[in-house]
Image (cartoon, rainbow, N blue to C red):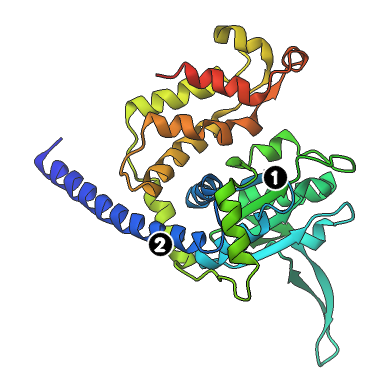
Amino acid sequence: MSAIDHKLSKTDEKAIIGQAEKAVSDISRVKKSIATVIFGQEEVIEQSLITILCGGHALLVGLPGLAKTKLVETLGITLGMAEQRIQFTPDLMPSDILGSEILHQDEDGKRSFQFVKGPVFAQLLMADEINRASPRTQAALLQAMQEHHVTIAGERYDLPAPFHVLATQNPLEQEGTYPLPEAQLDRFLMQIDVLYPDLEAERQILFETTGAQQNVAKKVLSAKRVQEIQNLIRKIPVGKSVIDAILELVRSARPDEENGENSQYISWGPGPRASQALMLSVRARALLDGRLAPSVDDVLDLAQPVLQHRMQLSFAARAEAITVRDIIAKLKSKIT
């Protein structure tokens, strides 16, 4: 490396550090704003922010009444993103999501088709109870999630940037639902489990939400600033030990003879997209914590939300009452 290259490298490094410090400050203000409306659920909030800062989509799995809708609404306000909500039902049609062409007649009597945009044309889309829609409707959302555009009557329409889908799913009441296919599950950066709040958080919920006045989320960032942080995250360096941990963890979650006893319990495992998701997620988590580089601990902490929806257990695992979480815990224990 020449002296000039070295100087440029140092300059770039200093610029990234400066940008990261400003981003840490901005993210801290976002977290404080969200905490005035959403009580407890720190891990859910963190993983939701990580998903958005990575430019991805998340599947929130939890029982009704755990503030999933409120969280998405609060994220939209705080991050300055246009938010829309779709309640998925069995009779929901693709056009109800994407939009449709209608016959329009102008003042001169000339008729033409005009495209009316659907709710998918938002920056933050909440797909409520996504598994209640038919596979055809789910597939309509799949193109939008992956390609960030939709095609109507042969015409391409780009979605707003940034574009994120936060979908919810009820772990109970599976009757009358359509399980998401593996291809669509893989499009979600994370599966975020929304659990019951702890005692103190629920006590705070009682005091803060049943009075005459309630806190309202405030705008902290703009959508443009969110995009700047998303670009910054891709520049954060990742050490060799972290990359090795990601590769070891993801590859060991596949049904391979080299993976020993765990292989018999795995029907299919995560592909390279899981490695990409972990690589981005650990960078975002480091930035959320005010660090300029991720660690192996970040890989271990994010292993479950990134991998659990990308794995299918075998009959042997189900017969022995082994869960995906059990397998992931075993795999994590082998990472040093």
Left-right relation of 313 to 259: right
Secondary structure category for the residue under label 1? strand
Residue 113 as seen in the image, left or right of residue 289 = right
What residue would you read off at disc 2? 29
Q: Which circle marks residue 215 in the picture? A: none
The residue drawn where x is 55% and y is 63% is: 37
Q: CA distance from mark 2 to mark 1?
A: 27 Å
Label 1 neighbour load within 10 Å: few <14, some 14-19, many 20+? some
Between residue 55 and residue 106, name the one nearer to us: 55
Q: Quadrant of the N terminus?
A: top left
Residue 329, compared with residue 36, is above or below; it is above
When the figure is inspected, residue 77 is found, relative to residue 279, above or below; the finding is below
- What kind of residue is marked 2? Arg
Callout 1 amino acid:
Gly
Dividing the picture into quadrants, the one containing residue 9 is top left
Nearer to me, 132 or 207: 207
| Residue 62 numbered tag | 1
- x and y, in percent, of residue 135 in the image: 82, 44
- x%, y% of residue 128? 74, 54
Indicate whether 266 appears above or below 126: above
Q: Nearer the viewer, residue 145 or 66?
A: 66
Q: Residue at x 74, y 66 (%)?
A: 118
Q: Is residue 180 left or right of residue 13?
A: right
| Camera sees residue 11 | yes
**Which quadrant would the C terminus be assigned to in this image?**
top left
Q: Earlier in the sequence, mark 2 or mark 1?
A: 2
Secondary structure of the residue carrying tag 2 is helix
Tally the numbered discs: 2
